[in-house]
Image (cartoon, helix red, strand yellow):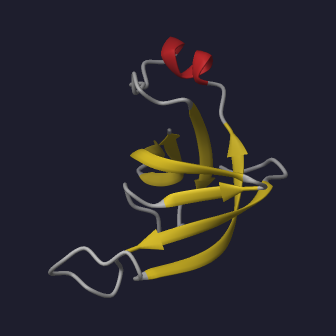
Amino acid sequence: MYNVNGMKATLIQNNRNTSSYYDDQDKQEVKIKVCPYNVDQAVRFGIYTVPEATGYFIVKANTPVREGDQLKIGDRTFSIIKVQDEWIWNKVANIILAVK
């Protein structure tokens, strides 16, 4: 469930076309909406946190995101270090991104 007005962001997808080696020129940019996530609530409800993460964001369940992608919000760029699904009633409701 994604019920809030999100912030505009750019998801920089790395290495989607080549699978055998790392290519720093293989980038795709996708416009998405993200919502900042308060991790204090997650600790209380048993969701695992990432010790080296500096922030958390929520995106819609159908967002094509992987670990290692980058998230650009305004003039700041974050690296996605962990992708976690949130399930409600046997389906993925949204995705939590741990960023650094």
Relative to 55, say whether 14 is above or below.
below
Relative to 21, say whether 56 is above or below.
above
Q: Residue at x 77, y 49 (%)?
A: 3
Q: Nearer the viewer, residue 52 or 86?
A: 52
Q: Nearer the viewer, residue 20 or 89?
A: 20
Horizontal and vertical percent position of residue 13: 47, 71
Horizontal and vertical percent position of residue 90: 41, 50
Q: Nearer the viewer, residue 21 or 97?
A: 21
Q: Nearer the viewer, residue 95 or 87?
A: 95
Horizontal and vertical percent position of residue 91: 44, 55
Horizontal and vertical percent position of residue 51: 39, 21
Left or right for 2, reference 70: right
Which quadrant of the view contains residue 20?
bottom left
Q: Residue at x 45, y 61 (%)?
A: 69
Is residue 83 visible in this depiction of the protein?
A: no
Q: Residue furthest right?
A: 5
Left or right for 82, reference 28: left
Q: Residue at x 50, y 15 (%)?
A: 43
Q: Residue furthest bottom?
A: 17
Q: Residue at x 52, y 81 (%)?
A: 28
Number of marks: 0
Is residue 66 visible in this depiction of the protein?
A: yes
Relative to 51, say whether 22 is above or below.
below
Left or right for 96, reference 19: right
Which quadrant of the view contains residue 38?
top right
Relative to 74, say whether 4 is above or below.
above
